[in-house]
Amino acid sequence: VAKDFTKAFELYNKAAELGHGKAAYSVGNCYEFGEGVAKDDKKAFEFYKKAADLGYDYGYNAVGNMYRNGKGVEKDEKKAFEWYQKAAEKSVPSAVYNIGYAYEAGEGVEKDEAKAIEWYTKAANQGMADAQWRLGNIYNNMKDYESAFKWYLKAANQDHSNAQVNLGALYSDGRGVPQDYKKAYE
């Protein structure tokens, strides 16, 4: 069928009214990004919350994002962290990453690099390129260049441009790997 955001919104909304969690999440997306309906962060939050209340995994993470960014609800980093924890319990990789970020940045919890590494590693092992890149950054700052190289390479192989730049720098400087200008250029 032809792409039709308005029709998609109508159908998602009908399913959400019937108690379908993924549909409620999709309605939230429509409101958050203005697809098929006028952009409305408060409505987006409402439907993400409904999705979470219906047990839809990604609804928990979306509610956390809304609290973290103060979209449709008052900004509250502690509540964001709590929602990320709920999503992580349901194995939502982006929530696992968000918990790592919260610990790294001290958002909603006390800053804790060891816990950031722990949570980023969980997300990285699930294939999240951003988590792999952030681990590379942490290890690079700790001057553990072999570990930094390992994580940058994993992210770079997923076309993560920042990781590719960092990997090039390691090759150029000979940190964690033998110096190799050709590989740095690549």
Image: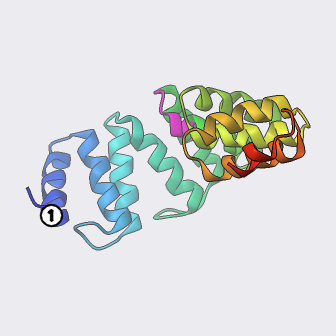
Where on the picture, by quarter, is residue 7? bottom left
Closer to the camera in the image, 178 or 79: 178
Seen at 40% across and 65% down, the residue is 42
Q: Is residue 92 magenta?
A: yes
Secondary structure, mark 1, is loop
How many C-alpha atoms fall within 10 Å of the one at disc 1: few (<14), some, or many (≥20)?
few
What's the residue type where badge 1 is placed? Asp
Say if residue 32 shows up in the picture. Answer: yes
Circle 1 sits on which residue?
A: 4
Where residue 143 appears, as percent x and y from the top left, is 91, 37
Which residue of the protein is positioned furthest toward the front in this rendering? 182
Which residue of the protein is positioned furthest toward the right in this rendering? 143
Seen at 67% across and 52% down, the residue is 162
The boundaries of the magenta stretch are 90-95
Closer to the camera in the image, 58 or 175: 175
Where residue 117 appears, as percent x and y from the top left, is 75, 32
Task: Give left or right: position of 52 versus 85.
Answer: left
Where residue 110 appears, as percent x and y from the top left, is 79, 42
